[in-house]
Image (cartoon, rainbow, N blue to C red):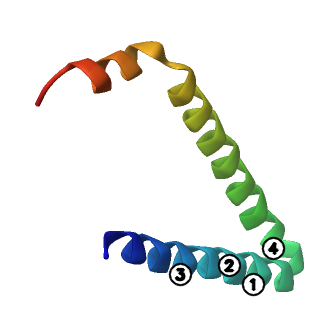
């Protein structure tokens, strides 16, 4: 049931991003500002995820420290 909720939320998020990008493209001259902002957020998100995957200290904490 939880996985179904995640799938539905993921579908809504993807649809929202597609509609957002298509709206920014339709508003061409001013929409470029929004596209650059989305690109910047995407680059930072990729950096955060890659840093988290490479951090062995966080892995040790999540595997060995009990709540």
Residue appearing at x 71%, y 78% in the figure: 18
Determine whether, in the image, residue 46 is placed left or right of residue 12. right
Is 15 positioned to the left or the right of 64 in the image?
A: right
Q: Residue at position x 68%, y 78% from top? A: 20
Q: Secondary structure at mark 4?
A: helix
Residue marked by disc 3 = 12
Q: Note whether 34 is above or below 53 in the view shown.
A: below
Q: Examine the rendered structure and indicate whether residue 60 appears above or below residue 46.
A: above
In the image, taking residue 10 as reference, residue 47 lies left or right, namely: right
Image quadrant where one finds the N terminus: bottom left
Instruction: Determine whether label 1 and label 4 are within 8 Å by CB.
Output: no
Q: Please give the name of the residue rendered at 88% of the width and 74% of the height, measured from the top-left corner.
A: 29
Sequence-wise, the earlier of marks 3 and 1 is 3
Q: Which mark is residue 20?
A: 2
CA separation, marks 3 and 1? 16 Å
Q: Position of residue 30 (x, y in %)?
A: 81, 73
Q: Residue furthest right?
A: 29
Front-most of 29 and 62?
A: 62
In terms of secondary structure, where does tag 3 sit?
helix
Q: Are marks 1 and 2 in contact (CB under 8 Å)?
A: yes
User: Local crowd at mark 4 within 10 Å, few (<14), some, or many (≥20)?
Assistant: few
Q: How far apart, in angstroms, are the residues tagged by discs 1 and 4?
A: 11 Å
Residue at the extreme left of the image, as rendered: 67
The spot of residue 55 in percent (x, y) is 49, 18
Q: Are marks 4 and 2 in contact (CB under 8 Å)?
A: no
**If you read the primary sequence from the N terminus, does the residue marked by circle 4 or circle 3 appear first?**
3
Q: Earlier in the sequence, mark 1 or mark 4?
A: 1
Classify residue 42 as left or right of residue 3. right
Per the image, the residue denoted by label 4 is 30
Calculate the distance from the C-alpha at mark 2 to the C-alpha at mark 3. Answer: 12 Å
Residue that label 1 marks: 23
């Amino acid at each position: 049931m939880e996985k179904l909720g995640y799938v539905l939320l993921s579908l809504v998020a993807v649809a929202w991003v597609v509609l957002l990008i298509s709206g920014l493209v339709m508003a061409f001259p001013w929409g470029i500002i929004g596209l650059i902002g989305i690109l910047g957020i995407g680059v930072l998100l990729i950096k955060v995820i890659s840093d988290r995957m490479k951090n062995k200290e966080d892995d040790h904490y999540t595997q060995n420290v009990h709540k």
